[in-house]
Amino acid sequence: MSCTANAVLEAEWARCRWLWNECCARSKKAHAEGEKCGPARLDKMLTEARTAMAWLREGSSVPQQQLIRDFAKSRAKALKDIKARLPQRQRTGMPRFKKKHQADPSLNYTRRGFRLKDGRLHLAGGIVVTVVWSREVPEPPSSARVYRDSVGHWHVSFVVPTLTEALPETGRVIGIDWGVKEAATTTSDDHDLPHAEHGKNAAQRLAHYQRMMAGRKPRKGQPGSNGYKAAKKQTAKLHKRVARQRQDAARKWAERVVRDHDALAVEDFKPKFLAKSTMARKAADAAIGATKRALVEMARKHGRAVHLVHPAHTTMDCAQCGARTKHALPLSERTYACTACGAVSPRDKNSARVMLVRAGLQPG
């Protein structure tokens, strides 16, 4: 992105950030006084602010109006959670102030606020951005979001209607069990997903950059030095690289599984299950949640049937006869032996076959 476009987008974000903080302040005041602070009141505030401030009028009204709507939705959701008396950990939380050097820019444009012409993105307010396209846009988008990530790269995401790209039928089905020794164990030996350990491979360099940040950390209220900012940027780059490696491996594996099978029986794995265990770090490095999400999205994109199986007792049931062991198997025991029918198989392979049985699919 050119320096001019970067400066213009940052200026647009500065106006939107000020507007968001003003909404937070007025919402907080209205809540303390017992008054309402709905979208109509916030729209009136925006009109008055644009009339009184020439600096705010220099920006487009489209992202500012969209920001007002997003703020109103977020506040309404938080108030609804409070009235429903949900536990604190399940509440959305009231919108908070966005700090200048901590909040990443994000601008939302509706259909009338942008257009695509000659491979360029034209935004409201006379902003023209040259885009490096990752893929073609299949249908005219209904909205666009322009945002900057932690590394400093600008991206744009479009909302388009979903299209199903049907694949030829293969007549095969597969059961998938998630784990930490292998990220995914399937009923097909050719489609098992080994643990790539991308985070473990980058841990030494990450610790180096984090030590640099700790040694150059500024005092509270003071701006960071150039050395601190450089170390922080290197840390963000490394985190982003690991995340992209995990995402790339998950998508390639998901595409291969979906292409070769008509139906998938997938363990409905909850990442919080292992987040509180001694294997939390290894489970996080395996990115099971992101891999499962990529698999489900790929299957639905190509019209494959996805069966999410509840994970309860999948390691205790026998895939051959359906008998259940009296006691849960310890994690150190990697072989499943059924006491009813005498079947012996690797523990994860047995669980993958249990997925197929519970989904009503025939392994053969």
Image (spheres, helix red, strand yellow):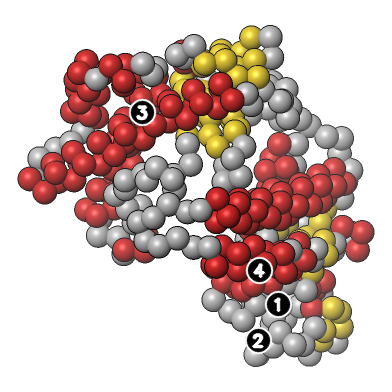
| Numbered disc 2: secondary structure | loop
Q: Which is nearer the N-term, disc 3 or disc 1? A: 3
Q: Which is nearer the N-term, disc 4 or disc 2? A: 4
Q: x, y (%) of residue 319?
A: 78, 73
| Numbered disc 3: secondary structure | helix
For label 2, the residue is 328
Q: Residue at x 77, y 66 (%)?
A: 201
Write down the quadrant of residue 48 in the picture: top left
Numbered label attached to residue 207: 4
Q: Is residue 19 left or right of residue 155?
A: left
CA distance separating discs 4 and 1: 37 Å
Q: Which is nearer the N-term, disc 4 or disc 1? A: 4
Q: Are marks 4 and 3 in contact (CB under 8 Å)?
A: no
Q: Is residue 118 visible?
A: yes
Mark 4 or 1: in front is 4
Q: Is residue 353 visible?
A: no
For label 1, the residue is 315
Q: x, y (%) of residue 155?
A: 60, 32
Q: Residue at x 71, y 25 (%)?
A: 132
The image shows residue 285, relative to residue 164, as above or below, that is below
Q: Which is nearer the N-term, disc 2 or disc 1? A: 1
> What kind of residue is marked 2?
Ala
Q: Which is nearer the N-term, disc 4 or disc 3? A: 3
The image shows residue 309, relative to residue 136, as above or below, that is below
Camera-nearest residue between 141 and 346: 141
